[in-house]
Image: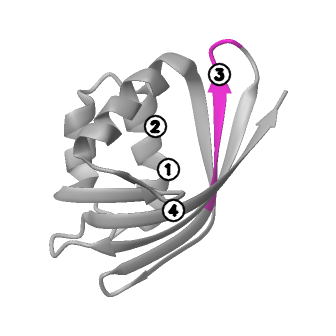
Amino acid sequence: MTPRTDLRGYLVRYPQEAGLGDEDPAMVLDRYHAPDYELVNDGVLLDRKRLLDHIHPARKRAVGLRVEVEQALVDGDQVAARYRLIAKLRKGGTITTEIYMFGELAADGRLRRTVQATRTIPSD
């Protein structure tokens, strides 16, 4: 499974595997993303190292998460999605993040670059 063959599946599985799984975060990242993957999130560039640095604290904060995909489109090497990530926090409460994602796929179907705009809505 790659983002090219199952974008909805990627949007649901990747956060689960990266944020809550026991597998090495680098292995999870590599499964779905090309070696030169870059994420621009709300104007901030995150390369591989910064993404991996982000996963470790996320694993400590969240005890559960759910993804609700509204739209997921693949057209050639381009992808777009609109979805919500709902994280249940270890200290109680939840955080809902609305995500608008546009990306480019590598030849092997993994993501090469993603640009996201997000809006986080604290709840509870």
Residue flagged by tag 3: what amino acid is it?
Leu
Q: Is the Cβ of the residue at disc 4 closer than 8 Å to that at disc 2?
A: no
> Image point 27% across, 54% down: which residue?
32
Say left or right for 23 vs 11: left
Tell me the CA gap for discs 3 and 2: 14 Å
Please name which of the two marks, 3 or 4, marks the residue nearer to the observer.
4
Front in this rendered view, residue 76 or 91: 91
Residue flagged by tag 2: what amino acid is it?
Gln
Q: Is the Cβ of the residue at disc 1 closer than 8 Å to that at disc 2?
A: yes
Neighbourhood count class around disc 4 (C-alpha, 10 Å): few under 14, some 14–19, many 20 upward: some
The disc, 4 or 2, on the residue closer to the chain's N-terminal end is 2
Q: Position of residue 19 (x, y in %)?
A: 44, 31
- Element at label 1: helix
Q: Tell me which corner region of the image, top left, top right, bottom left or bottom right, holds residue 83.
A: bottom right
Q: Which residue is mark 3?
A: 89
Location of residue 20 with respect to 35 vertically, above or below: above
Residue flagged by tag 1: what amino acid is it?
Val
